Image: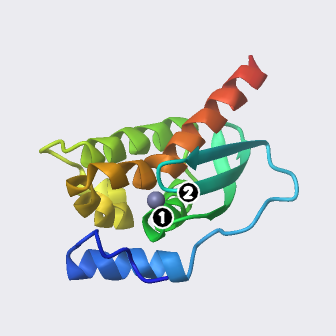
Amino acid sequence: MPLDRDVELDELYREIILDHYRSPRNRGSLAQPTVTGEGDNPLCGDEVELGLEIRDGQIVDVRFQGTGCSISQASASMMTAAIKGLSLEEAEALFEAFKDVMYGADEVDAEALGDLEALQGVRKFPVRVKCATLAWNTLEEALEAYRKGQG
Ligand code: ZN
């Protein structure tokens, strides 16, 4: 499936997104996840399932599975690559930084975002922002469930 034609992105960003879409990082499922999450974006038909292994407040492993458009699946791949090895607090800070990009903040800490920066062009297409943030919202719900379980 080609990158959706209604999303016109800079060539470099397009390449990064296509690379993650074609060769997703951390795709699959964990044998014994600490916590899992499921999310969907009915507007587009995107679905993402996450499994996280959390140890001592750190995300030591993460896998995702899903179906949907190239933006949603590339974003999930980028997210897993970005959060692996981070503490829960760092992962949440990264989500905040990513949301800033998606919702158009002027000042963005692009360095912290790595490949995720490639998704900034998506913000010109508000409908597609839901595709780009699906994996992150799913992560947030999974972390909330984890914290409740730790209660
Ligand atoms: Zn989508």
Report x, y in % for residue 110: 25, 56
Work out whether mark 1 precedes mark 2 in sequence or the reverse, and give the earlier one. 2
Disc 2 secondary structure class? strand
Q: CA distance from mark 1 to mark 2?
A: 16 Å
Which three-letter amino acid code belongs to the residue tagged 1? Met
Q: 44 or 21: which is nearer to us?
A: 44
Q: Quadrant of the C terminus?
A: top right
**With respect to residue 117, does 51 lie above or below?**
above
**With respect to residue 120, does 5 lie above or below?**
below
Q: Nearer the viewer, mark 1 or mark 2?
A: 2
Q: Residue at x 61, y 34 (%)?
A: 141
Q: Is residue 34 left or right of residue 13?
A: right
Q: Residue at x 23, y 72 (%)?
A: 9
Label 2 neighbour load within 10 Å: few <14, some 14-19, many 20+: many
Q: Is residue 89 left or right of residue 129?
A: right
Q: Is mark 2 within 8 Å of ligand 1?
A: yes
Q: Residue at x 69, y 43 (%)?
A: 37
Q: Is residue 9 left or right of residue 41?
A: left
Disc 1 secondary structure class? helix
Which three-letter amino acid code belongs to the residue tagged 2? Asp
- Asked which quadrant contains residue 55, the reply is top right
Query: Is the residue under label 2 in contact with that under label 1 (CB below 8 Å)?
Result: no
Q: Residue furthest top?
A: 151
Report x, y in % for residue 123: 25, 53
Q: Which residue corresponds to mark 2?
A: 46
Label 1 neighbour load within 10 Å: few <14, some 14-19, many 20+: many
Q: Which residue corresponds to mark 1?
A: 78
